[in-house]
Amino acid sequence: MIAILAHHAGEEKLQAVVHAIEKRGLQAHVSRGMDRIVVGIIGKFDPSFSEQLRQMSGVENVVRISKTYKLASRDFHPSDTVIERKGVRIGGDALIVMGGPCAVESKEQIMDIAARVQQAGAHVLRGGAFKPRTGPYAFQGVGVEGLEWMKEAGERYGLLTITEVMTPEYVEVCAEYADILQVGTRNMQNFDLLRKLGTVRTPVLLKRGFSATYEEWLNAAEYILAGGNADVMLCERGIRTFETYTRNTLDLAAIPVLRQLTHLPVIADPSHGTGRRELVAPMTKAAVAAGAHGLIIEMHTDPDNSMTGDGVQSLYPDQFDALMRDVKQLAPLVGMTL
Ligand code: PEP
Ligand code: MN
């Protein structure tokens, strides 16, 4: 349910509405737009209460939200969420670019790549220290030491860092080192992990499960939001279809669809979305044209010797530079700035 107040209703009337909601043991989430204030109400309540709210001074309407997710929906929060971390904005009209290797392999590797990410004008260094591999014998990541190297690289080059967290037990340690926590496609419905991420205040990039519908994906985000962490961004990274030429099928329509359904920032991952280096640049540009708030792109200084199979989809640093130049030109055409 949402209660809608005119913007000029004023603080006193708003607080009276919030108080009436909380007195019933329900939660009130206030979202202030240009000409309306929306109060989202979470919890179970009887129809007589919606009638009571409707009668309150300043309330224009009370509307039932039939979607299964609430906090993630645009009905609850009409304006775009803008996440801020160390002065960097994610969401709104700022286009953010995250670049780096699939996995942190050594201190030297991550330092060299961080230098190139920064030189190219990107904002965030990506790199997995814990890798979710399909097979148990494949390289699983270097662990906590990798988090230390990444943090140092981020500090040295003035970049934010993003890394994947796979289990609830590692959320706090990863949050200690990284600026953004990534939930991988295989963990999108790891509800214990999502609940734990609701308890920290580190922004979360939630990748789409490779077989997840938009509704399932938004409900996964709802777990984190319901726990109290409001800084969630969604990442389209390709879904599984009958096509085998590409590793996944990057669902570009997800970008405008999500921008309608949710206020959360939408990021695109053309690397895992295609699995092929030559397709990364065109799909990056397509994602920007479709309205993405940001991009996460694999880049490696020596992709042919990368320790995960993702070298084949990683850009060489010069290709990353060239792509950044193109994105910089394209961004203003869709109202974004890089
Ligand atoms: C990754 O970002 O390297 C990764 C493993 O991504 P995904 O979960 O999308 O496969
Ligand atoms: Mn990868």
Image (spheres, rainbow, N blue to C red):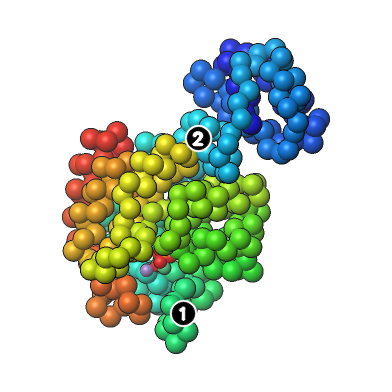
In the visual, does 17 lie left or right of 248?
Answer: right
- The answer to whether marks 1 and 2 mark residues whose Cβ atoms lie closer than 8 Å is no
Residue at horizontal 73%, vertical 38%?
44
Q: Quadrant of ligand 2?
A: bottom left
Q: Secondary structure at mark 2?
A: loop
The image shows residue 324, relative to residue 95, as above or below, that is: below
* Residue 158 in view, yes or no: no
The image shows residue 113, relative to residue 52, as above or below, that is: below
Under mark 2, the amino acid is Arg
**Mark sitting on residue 54:** none
Assign the C terminus to one quadrant of the image.
Answer: top left
Q: Is mark 1 within 8 Å of ligand 1?
A: no
Q: Where in the figure is residue 15, as x and y percent of width and height?
A: 72, 22
- Few, some or many residues within 10 Å of mark 1 (<14, 14–19, 20+): some
Assign the N terminus to one quadrant of the image.
Answer: top right
The residue to which callout 1 is attached is 140
